[in-house]
């Protein structure tokens, strides 16, 4: 018996069938597998604007295998629109809402499986969390990146424009040049072009085995994306027919593979949160120590923005994620025996992949861009559970300087604009964690302003919030425990010395233990910032960033 028979078969379900027939379906349609097509779509920004058109191709793929597709949409927060505003508090929250929406819609309507079409940052992890949680036949496809923009003959992405804000406000860029960059930074539909969060998580869809090989890298406007959308529809039918489920694919080793690719690519620190959350839903034990261990043995071999030169479209031009995986597998760094949605192993999927690289987008393995992984996990009295440092995006690996403490992103941004931050300072932004923010906002506006002011290599920033995948500089985020949970970051004062030592994986508040004890006794937990509504609910239920900021 099919899963959908409980909803659509038998005399007692005649009213259910009547509702479906009102939409033009017939008895044959209702005897087929009922397949959801989860489309992360809205008109809030270009990242997902094309997803509904891709959903039509996925529907055709499902119909070609005698399935009955049913499209539904999920929430989407466009981070590039919400960034630097109160709206950014909803971004990480949307990840949970996406997973919940998929679960709600698929289970409420008795679908046999589903295909998920993702785009902007939180949509890929949200979809994969739903897949892991529900554990019914399902597949995900990333809807694609924008093409690179061009400014005065130079290839750019939206991260360059965020940094240009600081340059313009600091009078080192003219209004004419500023507007020229604004007009050209995002030329097409699709998610941000660099190896920011959306494209990092797109890589993860393939590496975890939940997406078709090669589907992540084609740009949104590339005809290949439409073909992959169709094939994704065919593939979900095969998964339903064979009974292959996400937890058959999501193993400890598949997550290690994902972390390996994350480190080798210098991808977004947000992937740390998201992989922890997906593993939680899959009931796989994963923690920050796994990221640290793998980071120490995997070289960074990808040269993509923000730490490098190229964008996702360039990776696509040399073969996409499969080429990177093949390089790593050939050097014994990923496990080729892991199963994927094709029904084949990673090794089988990569068998015929040819490696065509010029040493630009992907380096020669024995000449890596950096000797170890792009992300380091730091621990110390300031982050006993851990903090996350994107070392690939920082020229400086060690910093010791006096604290300048702020209790919100807005306070910090104003201080930078007012020239209150000096070279050598350590900016501390607290009460921006999962509970304290709530929502763990990304500090891209702040970090971009620092770079625009020329302070990117001389000022460090630590926060219990997050950073955008476009962030670069001496930035340590995800500090846990967060201030709202009584982490040491809550009692830091202006002038306290803070040491960030990435080579030795340490981050410490250099204050006498007796003074720390005294301050902790005096600290009082502040009230939640929101008394009602979604952010109030989220703040009460969310776990530490070291646990993936999942709902508990």
Image: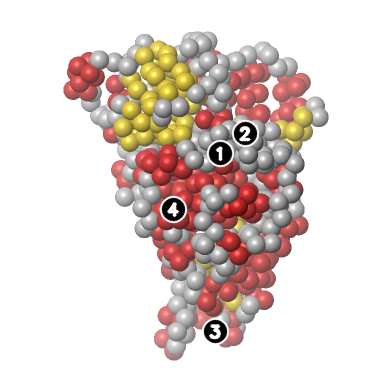
Horizontal and vertical percent position of residue 243 = 49, 75
Q: Would you say 222 lies left or right of 308 here?
A: right
Secondary structure type for disc 1: loop
Horizontal and vertical percent position of residue 552 = 31, 50
Q: In which quarter of the image is residue 116?
A: bottom right
Task: Please tell me which residue is depicted at 59% across the width and 15% down the height of the picture.
Answer: 453
Which marked residue is nearer to the observer: mark 1 or mark 4?
A: 1
Which label's residue is closer to the chain start, 1 or 4? 4
Q: Measure how far apart labels 4 and 3 are at the Cα level.
A: 33 Å
Q: Residue 376 carries which label?
A: none
Which label's residue is closer to the chain start, 4 or 2? 4
Which marked residue is nearer to the observer: mark 4 or mark 3?
A: 4
Horizontal and vertical percent position of residue 73 = 55, 58
The residue identified by callout 2 is 369
The residue identified by callout 3 is 31
Which label's residue is closer to the chain start, 1 or 2? 1
Task: Please tell me which residue is depicted at 73% across the width and 19% down the height of the picture.
Answer: 175
Secondary structure type for disc 4: helix
The residue identified by callout 4 is 278
The residue identified by callout 1 is 299
Q: Measure how far apart labels 3 and 1 are at the Cα level.
A: 52 Å
Which marked residue is nearer to the observer: mark 4 or mark 2?
A: 2
**Residue 308 seen in the current view:** yes
Horizontal and vertical percent position of residue 395 = 56, 23
Note whether 127 is above or below 500 in the view shown.
below
Q: Would you say 152 lies left or right of 113 here?
A: right
């Amino acid at each position: 018996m099919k899963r959908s028979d409980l909803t659509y078969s038998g005399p007692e379900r005649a009213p259910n069938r009547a509702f479906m027939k009102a939409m033009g379906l017939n008895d044959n349609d209702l005897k087929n597998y009922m397949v959801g097509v989860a489309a992360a779509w809205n008109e809030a920004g270009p990242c997902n604007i094309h997803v509904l058109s891709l959903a039509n191709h996925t529907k055709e793929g499902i119909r070609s295998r005698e399935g009955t597709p049913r499209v539904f949409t999920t929430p989407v927060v466009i981070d590039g629109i919400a960034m630097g505003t109160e709206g950014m508090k909803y971004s990480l929250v949307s990840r949970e809402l996406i997973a919940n929406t998929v679960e709600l819609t698929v289970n409420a309507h008795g679908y046999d499986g589903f295909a998920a079409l993702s785009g902007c940052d939180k949509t890929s992890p949200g979809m994969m969390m739903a897949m892991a949680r529900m554990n019914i036949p399902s597949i995900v496809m990333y809807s694609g990146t924008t093409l690179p923009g061009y400014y005065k003959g130079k290839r750019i992405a939206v991260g360059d424009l965020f940094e240009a804000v600081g340059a313009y406000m600091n009078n080192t860029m003219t209004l004419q040049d500023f507007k020229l960059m604004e007009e050209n930074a995002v030329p097409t539909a699709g998610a941000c072009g660099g190896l920011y969060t959306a494209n990092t998580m797109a890589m993860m869809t393939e590496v975890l085995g939940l997406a078709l090989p090669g589907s992540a890298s084609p740009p949104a406007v590339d005809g290949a994306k439409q073909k992959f959308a169709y094939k994704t529809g065919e593939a979900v039918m095969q998964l339903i027919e064979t009974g292959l489920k996400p937890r058959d694919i999501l193993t400890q080793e598949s997550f290690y593979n994902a972390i390996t690719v994350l480190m080798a690519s210098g991808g977004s620190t947000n992937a740390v949160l998201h992989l922890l959350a997906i593993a939680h839903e899959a009931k796989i034990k994963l923690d920050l120590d796994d990221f640290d261990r793998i980071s120490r043995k995997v070289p960074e071999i990808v040269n993509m923005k923000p730490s490098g030169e190229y964008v996702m479209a360039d990776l696509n031009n040399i073969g996409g994620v499969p080429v990177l995986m093949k390089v790593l597998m050939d050097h014994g760094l990923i496990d080729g025996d892991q199963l994927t949605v094709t029904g084949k192993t990673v090794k089988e999927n990569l068998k015929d992949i040819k490696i065509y690289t010029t040493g630009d987008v992907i380096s020669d393995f024995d000449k890596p861009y950096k000797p170890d992984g792009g992300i380091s996990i730091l621990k110390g009295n300031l982050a006993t559970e851990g903090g996350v440092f994107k070392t690939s995006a920082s020229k400086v690996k060690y910093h010791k300087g006096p604290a300048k403490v702020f209790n919100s992103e807005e306070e910090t941004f104003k201080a930078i604009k007012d020239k209150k931050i000096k070279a050598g300072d350590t900016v501390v932004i607290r009460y921006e964690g999962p509970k304290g923010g709530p929502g763990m906002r990304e500090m891209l506006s702040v970090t971009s302003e620092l770079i625009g002011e020329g302070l990117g290599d001389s000022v460090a920033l630590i926060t219990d919030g997050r950073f955008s995948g476009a962030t670069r500089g001496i930035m340590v985020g995800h500090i846990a425990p967060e201030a709202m949970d009584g982490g040491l970051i809550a009692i830091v004062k202006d002038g306290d010395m803070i040491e960030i030592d990435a080579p030795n994986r340490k981050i410490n508040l250099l204050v006498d233990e007796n003074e720390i004890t005294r301050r902790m006794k005096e600290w009082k937990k502040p009230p939640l910032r929101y008394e009602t509504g979604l952010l109030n609910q989220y703040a009460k239920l969310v776990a530490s960033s070291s646990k993936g900021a999942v709902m508990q």
